[in-house]
Amino acid sequence: MQFLYFSLNDFEGPVPPEFGNLANLRDLSLTSNARMSGALPLELTNLTQLETIVAHDTGICAPSDTAFLSWLDRIPAARIARCEGEQGMAYLTQATQSLEYPVPLVANEEALLRVFVTAARSNDEDIPPVRATFYRDGTQWLVVDIAGKPGPIPTVSDERKLGSSANAWISGDYVVPGLEMVIDVDPEGMLDPALGVQRRIPATGRMEVDVETTSVFDLTVIPFLWTESSDSSILDITNALAANSDLLFETRTLLPVADFDVTVHSPVLSSSNNVYDLLSETAAIRAMEGASGHYMGTMTTPVTGGARGVAERPGRVSFSIPVGWIMAHELGHNMSLRHPWENPSYPSYPDGFTGAWGYDFRDGGRLVPPWKNDIMLGCCWISDFHFTQALRFRQSEGAGRSDRSGHRLSQSTSLLLWGGIDSDSVPFLEPTFVVDAPATLPNSTGDNRLTGHSDTGTELFSLSFDMPEIADGDGRSSFAFILPAREAWEKTLATVTLTGPGGSVTLDGDSELSMAILRDPLTGQVRGFLRDPPTATQAAADAQVTGAHGLEVLFSRGIPDADAWRR
Ligand SMILES: [Zn+2]
């Protein structure tokens, strides 16, 4: 059993400890069972495959057992209230936060402190001064005094108005792992004790603030120029692009991104303006350039194919028209996020509201209400659920991958093998090229297979892989691998075949699938994909029309010919 959706079932009582025996469980959804309650059983920590656990709109909570909470922190998609704690009284928020379902903070990004001072009875008192003392590694580090302000003091924590909490901006310099805080309310003791205002949060000890470091978010943006159009306005957009550009506001704010490296690729000429072709080409460029970061292709409209953005989920390749929220949406897919309407575990499934109060630091700061659309539905904010899931995903990815940045991997004569499946799952192959590039091979096996054969039928290579999931692709998918070649293949490689659940396709010397790839021999950057060019010479000439001089032209009719091997 891998999936248990118990949502909206009117179950009651606690979760039975026997659930801990469902060793293969990946998704446990208990939402909207108002009569379910109690602490989750510690036996659940046996569920090591769990990817989703949600229990909003229930009375179920997470026990404050250290081992249980660290198990819960490793689950990418989790939304479980804490059984006890001081979360209801003060928090730090960045893009989004929730009294009930605490959202981790991203290190080194500024945060807003909100202290929810409450009184035991209704009153006309002003909200008293508040002193927040922050500790790092047990040592006092920062003291922030927040002046009192007009009341009344609310009787319950009220997130809906900034005026009902004591607030202070905390510089990103102080938002670091190991942060703890103590809040002293009314430090001078001016309030009537009969109001029942809690003077210290937490009552004893210090409140841990969950601050998480993330690896550098390395994004390369590729401006595509369509050969059929003279529109080069995308270059005006990308030439000005930097990590702090308005166009990347949603990416750097709504996604768990702190250190943000943005590289703008040289323009790439493409004879297609179809978003799926452009996604494929982006994947091929990333593979040919041996990159480890995220690659996003972009082109000004008109693009065809029916989507304005498309992305591997999860993955590192995407395409988006240059619209900020669409770019963030596609990068959200790269960080494993799905559409709310496709995910029964999503808090406001299928409506896609954020469901939590956000905060926008622009223009002096303002609250963002929970009925805004989540970025994975449309414009323009992020839910507590998705922010946490993307952060957990980035952390697991950082832990699982070796850091290849900064190292130029050894290049050797290789084959660019690329293709995919169409929306009916029918496989297709793009022409195979001989390239000098570092290897990019599948990192898991699966039910698709690429094979190369000689004309006598001898198998030269065989790669098994899973077709990546492409979000917004209507069932389509694409891949690009770089396979180091053996010398003998120059004379022997006669066919390349892709076989998958939806059928099989073979390229051979008669495929008539001409394509030229333009590459800058100095930088190694890919500069063009020209489908069906009259001749290689013509392709080179076309490229020079755009001012791209001195480009190397790689040419293939499906299977590389002798010239291609001898370059
Ligand atoms: Zn999408």
Image (tube, rainbow, N blue to C red):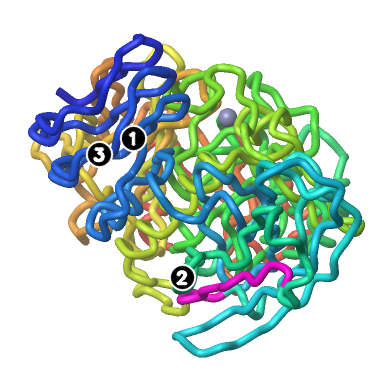
Residue at (79, 48) in percent of width and height: 164
Q: Nearer the viewer, mark 3 or mark 1?
A: 1
Q: Is residue 176 above or below residue 557?
A: below
- Reading the image, the residue beneath label 2 is 204
Residue at (49, 27) in percent of width and height: 346
Identify the image quadrant of the C terminus.
Answer: bottom left
Mark 2 is on which residue type?
Answer: Thr
> Which residues, given as a range, are shown in magenta?
176-186
User: Is residue 181 found inside the magenta-colored segment of the image?
Assistant: yes
Q: Which label belongs to residue 50?
A: 3
Mark 2 or mark 1, which is nearer the start of the sequence?
1
- Reading the image, the residue beneath label 1 is 53
Identify the image quadrant of the N terminus.
Answer: top left
Q: Is residue 457 above or below residue 159?
A: above
Task: Decide which of 549, 427 is in the foreground and name it.
Answer: 427
Mark 1–mark 2 CB contact (< 8 Å)? no
Give the alpha-carbon distance from disc 2 to disc 3, as whole Å.
Answer: 34 Å
Horizontal and vertical percent for residue 450? Answer: 24, 36
Q: Is residue 452 visible?
A: no
Mark 3–mark 1 CB contact (< 8 Å)? yes
Residue at (55, 47) in percent of width and height: 387
Residue 496 sits in quarter: top left
Residue 476 sits in quarter: top left
